Amino acid sequence: PDDATRAAAPAGCPAAEAAPELFTWEFASDPYPAYAWLREHAPVHRTALPSGVEAWLVTRYTEARQALADARLSKNPVHHSEAAHGKGKVGIPGERSANLMTHLLNIDPPDHTRLRRLVSKAFTPRRVAAFAPRVQELTDRLIDDMIAKQGGAECGAADLIHEFAFPLPIYAICDLLGVPREDQDDFRDWAGMMIRHGGGPRGGVARSVKKMRGYLAELIHRKRESLGETAEADEDLISGLIRASDHGEHLTENEAAAMAFILLFAGFETTVNLIGNGIYALLRHPAQRELLQKSIAAGDTELLTTGIEELLRYDGPVELATWRFATKELTLGGQTIAEGDPVLVVLAAADRDPARFAEPDVLDLTRRDNQHLGYGHGIHYCLGAPLARLEGQTALATLLTRLPDIRLAAEPDDLRWRGGLIMRGLRSLPVEFTPER
Ligand code: HEM
C-alpha cells in the first residue's frame, strides 16, 4: 500500500494529533498499536482505504461480534452505495468477469441458507477427519523435500512460507476437491500469483482467477458425467457437491463452480498465514514454544488444540472480515452508518480487546477463555474451520517434532508482511535448523 491513508480523527477529539497512520508498511508489520488507538478513541471509524473506497472499521470485540451477526449488514455488493465507491471496487479481483459472484461470502439468506446447507452436506467434519492421514503425508513430504535440499549440510536453511506454509494448503484443498495430482501444480502457480499480488496489481490475479474458474467448470462437468462410477464413500468433495441435494434441490454447475472456487480462495491464503504467523509467533516466544514441544513429545494434544486457537487470536490470518454493506441506516458503537456504507470488522483488533481478553497482547497457549473471532461469527462463520484446525495442528506438530531446533534466520524488523487489506501474513520466513539424519 503505497498510498498511505491518514485516519481521520473525529472532529474536536483532543487526541486528534495522535491518530495513527493506517495501511502503511509500518502498519502492515505491526498494526496492533494503531488498532489499540482506534479501539480506545474511534471504535467505529470511517476512513478511506488504499483503493479509495470509504469504509467503517469496527475494532472493539462487542461491536465486532454484533456487526458480524447483524442481518442489516448484507454481504451482497449490490448494496454498496455509489457514494462510498470512491476509486475502487470491492471484492475478489476477477470474480465479476469470471461469473463467480454467487458464492457464500457474497450472499444473504435465503440464498445463503440454501447454498450453505447444500455444501455442508458434502463438506462434513467426517470427510475432514478422514482426510487426516493425507494431510500428514503431505506435511511429511514437504519437510522431506526441505531436508533433501540441504544436501547433507550441517545447518539447514529454508523459507518456511515458500517451501512449507504455501504449498501445504493448496495441495490439501486440491486433493480434497478431487483435482487430479498432475494438474495441482497449475493451481500452485495460480495461487502463487494471487498471494504474491494480493493488494497489488489486479490484472495478474484476475487472469489467475479466470483460469482457475475455467478449469473448475470443466472438471465439474467431467465429474458430473462420470458420477455413479465410484462408490459414494470414495468420492471427492466436488462429486459430493454435485450429488448433494436438499429437498430434491441440487447445486447448478455454475453454483458448484463458484462453491469450489470459494473453498479454494477462502481456504488457501488463510491457512498459509495460520501456519506462517503461527510458527513465527512461536519462534518469537521461546518459553511457549518449549512448552508446546514438550507436550507434543509427550503425546499430549491438549496444548496443541488450545494453542492453535490462541495463535489465531494472537495474530490470525484474517485481519479484517470480508465486506459488509448496510442495507438501511443503523447505529453501531454510537456512530450512524448510512445505507450503502461498507463496514469492515477488524477481527485482529477485536481479538486483542482488553475488555474481552485478559492480557490480550500476551501469547498464552494454555488460554481457555478464548472465544476469538478469527473464524468470524454468525451465519458466515468459517465453513472450513475443521480443515484449518487439522492442517494447522498437523503442520505445527510435525515441524516442531522433525526440526526441533528450528529458529528464525532474520531480524524481525527485516521481515516483510504482505500489505493486502483482508489478510495478514508474511512474505517470507527464513529459518535455520539441523536437518534430521
Ligand atoms: C468464512 C477465517 C480456513 C472456507 C470465513 C470467515 C472467516 C474465516 C473470518 C468469515 C468471513 C466473514 O464473515 O466475512 C478462516 C481462517 C482460516 C480459514 C482464519 C484458516 C486458519 C478456511 C478453509 C476453508 C474455508 C480451510 C475451506 C476449505 C470458508 C468459507 C467461508 C469462510 C467457504 C464462507 C462461509 C459463509 O459465508 O457461509 N473464514 N478461514 N476457510 N471460510 Fe474460512
Image (cartoon, helix red, strand yellow):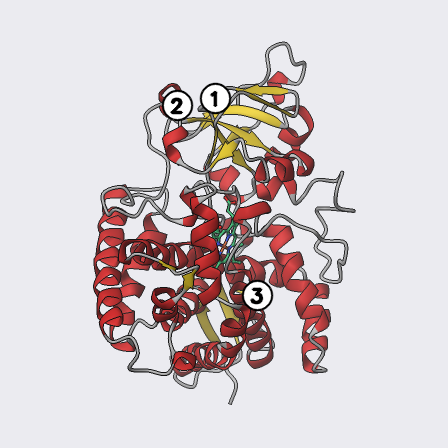
Taking the spot 58% from the left edge, 43% from the top edge, the residue there is 347
Instruction: Tell me where residue 249 appears, x and y as whole percent.
Output: 38, 58
Taking the spot 52% from the left edge, 37% from the top edge, the residue there is 27
Taking the spot 57% from the left edge, 25% from the top edge, the residue there is 45
Question: In the drawing, what numbered circle is on residue 339?
Answer: 1
Name which quarter of the figure residue 398 lies in.
bottom right
**Residue kind at label 2, given as amino acid type:** Ser
Residue under numbered circle 2: 81
Does the residue at mark 1 contact the one at mark 2 (Cβ under 8 Å)? yes
Left or right, 177 with respect to 35, comes to left
**Residue kind at label 3, given as amino acid type:** Arg
User: Can residue 429 be seen from the camera position used here?
Assistant: no
Closer to the N terminus: mark 1 or mark 2? 2
Left or right, 104 with respect to 29, comes to left
Residue under numbered circle 3: 389
Q: Is mark 3 within 8 Å of ligand 1?
A: yes
